[in-house]
Amino acid sequence: MDLYYYTYNTVIGSLNITADDFYIRYISLGKYKNDSHILKETEIINNAFKQINEYLNGNRKNFSLNIKYEGTLFQQKVWQSLLNIPYGNTISYKELAEKVFSPKAYRAAGSACGQNPLPIIIPCHRVVHSNGSISGYALGADIKAFLLNLEKNSLT
């Protein structure tokens, strides 16, 4: 199976979108280098970019994309649970662990957030510490703050 990627300039930096012929598989920021992936802007990738760009401009609250992710059963439960956090809302890592029926596994839930292959689309940025503080985002704490503020401001 071939994987394709394309890089776009966005308000949060260089956004790399990777897909196969059917699904969006990975999202990352910054310089992208993977010799096994083919540089090609496919229709699936371009559609994902358009939706992400609309979101980043405050004009989209939900994504309508075919996504596929691989991980442990626990990671998949966490990522699926993240998809259920409403736009503009946050939960704590402890609440996230409780949602996947592992109330003591809040560190593992945080680790699963950090391994999220589809940040923004799978909104791990909506998970914060119990005291409301922001940290631990794979794309950077400043981008997490940007995304949370974007959603908060779009609701008003």
Image (cartoon, grey):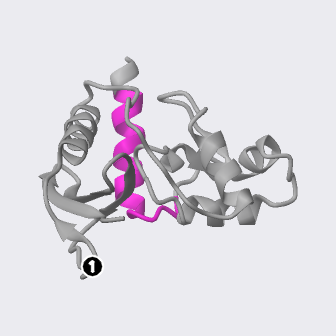
Residue 50's quadrant in the figure?
top left
Measured as percent of width and height from the top left, residue 99 is found at 78, 41
User: Which residues are drawn in magenta?
Assistant: 135-153
Residue situated in front as seen by the camera: 153 or 77: 77
Image x and y of residue 31, in percent: 20, 74
* Tag 1: amino acid: Asn
Position of 147 relative to 134 (above/below): above
Number of callouts in the render? 1
> Is residue 118 rendered to the left or right of residue 130?
left
Q: Residue at x 66, y 41 (%)?
A: 81
Question: Magenta segment, principal secondary structure?
Answer: helix
Q: Is residue 141 left or right of residue 42?
A: right
- Name of the residue lying farthest toward the top: 156
Residue depicted at x 22% and y 32%: 54
Question: Is 139 within the magenta?
Answer: yes
- The residue that label 1 is drawn on is 34
Q: Is residue 126 above or below residue 62?
A: below
User: Where the N terminus falls, by quadrant?
Assistant: bottom left
SS at badge 1? loop
Viewer-closest of 18 and 148:
18
Residue sticking out furthest to the front: 1
The residue lying at 62 percent from left, 43 percent from top is 80
Residue at the (23%, 73%) spot, across then down:
32
Where residue 152 appears, as percent x and y from the top left, is 41, 29
Observer-nearest of 23 and 114: 23
Q: Residue furthest bottom?
A: 35
* Quadrant in which the C terminus is drawn: top left
Which one is in front, 39 or 30? 39
Q: Could you classify mark 1 by the number of other residues whose Cα lies within 10 Å: few (under 14), some (14-19), or many (20 or more)?
A: few
Q: Is residue 107 left or right of residue 114?
A: right
Q: Position of residue 51 (x, y in %)?
A: 26, 34
